[in-house]
Image (cartoon, rainbow, N blue to C red):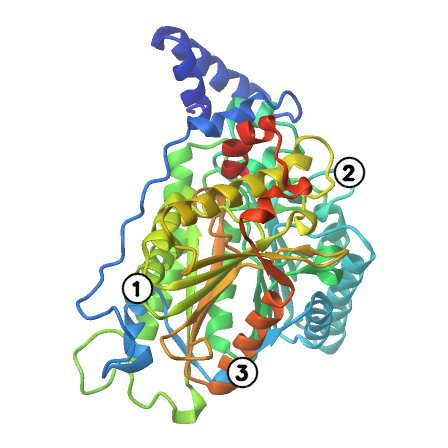
Amino acid sequence: MAAPMSWRRLVYSVYPPAIAGVFTRISDRIFRARDRRGGSSVLLLAPLLAEADPAPRLVSRPAGSAGAQGTEGLFGHFRWMAEHVPAFRVPGTHIHILTSPDQFYKTMKARIKTAKRRVVMASLYLGTGQLEQELVDCMEDALQRSQENSDSPDLKVSVLLDYTRGSRGQINSRTMLLPLLQRFTSQMRVSLYHTPDLRGLLRLLVPQRFNETIGVQHIKVYLFDDSIIISGANLSDSYFTNRQDRYVLLENCGEVADFFADLVEAVGDVSLQLQPDDSVTMLEGMVHPYKGNRQDFSTAARKRIMEVVNTAQMRQQLTNQPEDSEDEGLSDGGLSDGGEDTWVFPLVQMKPLGIQVDEQVTQRLLTDAGPNSTVFLTSGYFNLTRAYMRLVLGAGAGYRILTASPEVNGFFGAKGVAGAIPAAYVHIARQFYNQVCSLGQQERIHLHEYHRPEWTFHAKGLWYYLQGKDRPCLTLIGSPNFGYRSVHRDLEAQIAIVTENKALQSQLQEEQERLYQRSTEVSSSTFEQPDRHVKLWVKLVTPLIKNFF
């Protein structure tokens, strides 16, 4: 088994090839013999030696795609998405924007209680507090009712979490779910995704507190029968009370729900399976993520996951194909028939497995955003990849970018190195602002900071306003942050919603305005404030933080 590539780069950059070869062989032998946690965090420096941020392969751009006001109309403008991902047509009246953590939490509890066939929950982790326990209790009650109401229980509950984050501490996500797994073994599945990049000496030496920085399962999908919530929020108490995120409920959208249920199942199939005794196993025939060959695991995982994407895409292309047309892709005919005036495109990003659909689509959207259109983009951790940065700085569209002020950053007040993360993001924002000013783009690109006492900010996504329109026609919503680790390290998923439904457009506009109303625009004086002073050592480690957070 090969030592992890980040470890190999670190060794070969310091030692001659002969000595480096000895070290990596020792790494392999130690790894095969032992599997323990703890140790030094020195190898957190390894990702600094990772390859540069290359521009992804662009989705082809047909002639005449710069505007959306031509004869093809709105859906014709975004037809290219269906060439690469499934395209689900749904009534705009079935999509509801949730506005608060409390509404998100109460909606999940209510939906779990009424679920008849399936509950599917994908998150980074499940917290261990009282609110999280009440959520688990709702699952238990639903499973119990299912057993009482049928000789052959129909309700199935599937939970997908990240292995490293879900296993942290003696009381953790696993211990929260074990009672359900022990009591409802045939109806309950708990899958723990483990990144293939955390292996060998890296896995042995990186402390438990930091091992999730190498890569995680970051998808946030909460599904109840044929309804689904897509969000960036985790299953933890702050996300239910005072951590602002975004959430969209797609109600009675069976095809979209089926797709995400299949996606979570596919990721679950390549993950470690939690057993009633708290041990973990792999499904028979599946390559182990950190004991097996790295390339073999990624190839098998990519094949399993892309089967879901490709099958759904082919099915939708056939469904949306006009009977008298030989053209592939979306049909614009009868968009309003039955109120189906909205398209939903699922976007998946899993770079460690060779899947980069979301990156390609996001880059195309930023490329196509023409003059006089406006993009409102938000991220709790403002850390655009170099490719995205180049597109924003070189585009014709106007940009309003919303990020967290230091006091609403989730790491504000943290102990140790993590406490420096808000200051690092101040430094990143200042570098970006200086670039905007040096290019004379201050009238086109505006940076905003979110403020809210006693709250933190975790919202991400974008709203796209076409030229001359006062309501957005497109939004991206889900787990990606537009940063390095979202693109290169983690498993991510979001949806692009394209809609002609005026009421849904108004919901999106109100959501965007509600978030920006709590912000102030950044200017050069912002960075002169005493609380924006960034220490030299923080500036020096900022490249490391950009890779990890």
Residue 181 appears left or right of 76: right
Residue 179 pos. (x, y %): 77, 53
- Mark 1 crowdedness (10 Å alpha carbons): few <14, some 14-19, many ≥20: many
Sequence-first disc among 1 and 3: 3
Furthest residue in direction bottom, as rendered: 337
The answer to whether one can see residue 262 in this image is no
Q: Secondary structure at mark 3?
A: helix
Q: Which quadrant of the figure has residue 167?
A: top right
User: Which residue position is annotated with label 2?
Assistant: 170
User: Which residue position is annotated with label 1?
Assistant: 368
Q: Which quadrant of the figure has residue 351?
A: top left
- Mark 2 crowdedness (10 Å alpha carbons): few <14, some 14-19, many ≥20: few
Type of residue at label 3? His
**Residue drawn at (22%, 59%) of the image:** 60
Above/below status of 455 relative to 464: above
The answer to whether one can see residue 1 in this image is yes
Q: Secondary structure at mark 1?
A: helix
| CA gap, disc 1 and disc 3 | 28 Å
| CA gap, disc 1 and disc 2 | 49 Å
Residue 225 pos. (x, y %): 59, 74
Q: Nearer the viewer, mark 2 or mark 3?
A: 3
User: Which residue position is annotated with label 3?
Assistant: 94
Above/below status of 217 relative to 117: above
Between 367 and 498, the one nearer to me in the picture: 367
Type of residue at label 1? Asp
